Amino acid sequence: MIATRDAYGEALAELGGENDKIVALDADLSGSTKTAVFAKKFPNRFFNMGIAEANMVGTAAGLAAVGKIPFLSTFAIFAAGRGWEQIRQSVAYPKANVKIVATHGGVTVGEDGGSHQSVEDVAIMRAIPNMTVIVPADGEETKGAIRAAAAYKGPVYVRLGRNKVPSVFPAGHKFEIGKGVVVVPGTDLTFITTGLMTAAAVTAAEKLKAEGISARVLHIGTVKPLDKELVLQAAQETGAIVTAEEHSVVGGLGGAVAEFLGETCPTLMKRVGIHDRFGTSGKSDELLKYFGLNAETLIEEAREIVSRKK
């Protein structure tokens, strides 16, 4: 197990040794976002911008304009919140080559409470034109996503978590922007998941198999652009979809899948996530259970949606 933010720190430092155009900016949280790993190796290409996220975004846009590849990091609540206008106007509108890597997303921030638990950042970033939105499942995919973001020319938002998460993908897993991955084959329903919920879906699929229910797990690492081909295939072949994300059900992965299928292939569907409310304080594992972000909830939703097919 490894936290996706730790994988980010390692990947960014590796990339820094391969490409001197890469620079890192941080809002005085480098110890937590793990850009400190890059700062230690490349102090002349690291900028601590202080607690001034909007200014950090504008500076990153300026660095991109002169050919640098800036990675800027802070907590998700501040990246998508305080930096929103500058991201829209200075990064997304001119298609600036800026990579926003937001850590501490979702309710697993834990005891920091609802004020610091960003459960709407994916929806906010997804609504901005020209923005690519990535939510990796584990450390290995995070490393691939950071490399893909560096190679991609344009604005990218990568959402990472605070805590260690189970491994879903083997070492060397190739991440490709815009491409989903069928982690578990299945025929009765499909779990379409992102972030840490993919590991929970794999566990749920294993337990459902013992009940005679064949659940497919389709991991969506790139929420935008959505892999419409795999989503449509899942809807047509299994006839039932359960989405799952550590995020509001409004505007995130579940929203993206519902919008697409509603127009192309109306399908039985359930959305597992935060239901239009803020987070609250507690230990991360307790909060995942409190909000139903676990394998047990996925199993219940799977049983219910499969029963509706009959």
Image (cartoon, rainbow, N blue to C red):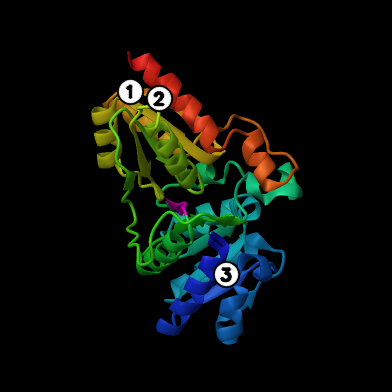
Q: Which residue is mark 2?
A: 269
Residue 4 in the image: state x and y as whole percent. Answer: 53, 60
Instruction: Tell me: residue 212, above or below residue 25.
Output: above
Q: Is residue 136 magenta?
A: yes
| Residue drawn at (61%, 46%) of the image | 106
Residue 258 in the image: state x and y as whole percent. Answer: 39, 29
Q: Residue furthest front?
A: 210
Instruction: Tell me: residue 85, above or below residue 246.
Output: below
Is label 1 in a helix, a strand or a loop?
loop
Q: Is residue 260 magenta?
A: no
Residue 242 in the image: state x and y as whole percent. Answer: 42, 30
Looking at the rendered structure, which numbered label has been put on residue 267? 1
Please report contact status of discs 1 and 2: CB closer than 8 Å, yes or no: yes
Is label 2 in a helix, a strand or a loop?
strand
Give whichever of discs 2 and 3 has the lower sequence position.
3
Q: Amino acid at mark 3?
A: Thr
- Along the line of sight, which residue is nearer the eye, 234 or 101? 234
Give whichever of discs 1 and 3 has the lower sequence position.
3
Please report contact status of discs 2 and 3: CB closer than 8 Å, yes or no: no
The quarter in which the N terminus is drawn is bottom right
Distance from disc 2 to disc 3, alpha carbons, whole Å, reads 43 Å
Horizontal placement of 20 versus 57: left or right? left
Distance from disc 1 to disc 3, alpha carbons, whole Å, reads 45 Å
Residue 42 visible in the displayed image = no
Instruction: Tell me: residue 235, above or below residue 9.
Output: above
User: Based on the displayed image, in which of its 4 quarters is residue 36 positioned?
Assistant: bottom right
Q: Which residue is mark 3?
A: 59
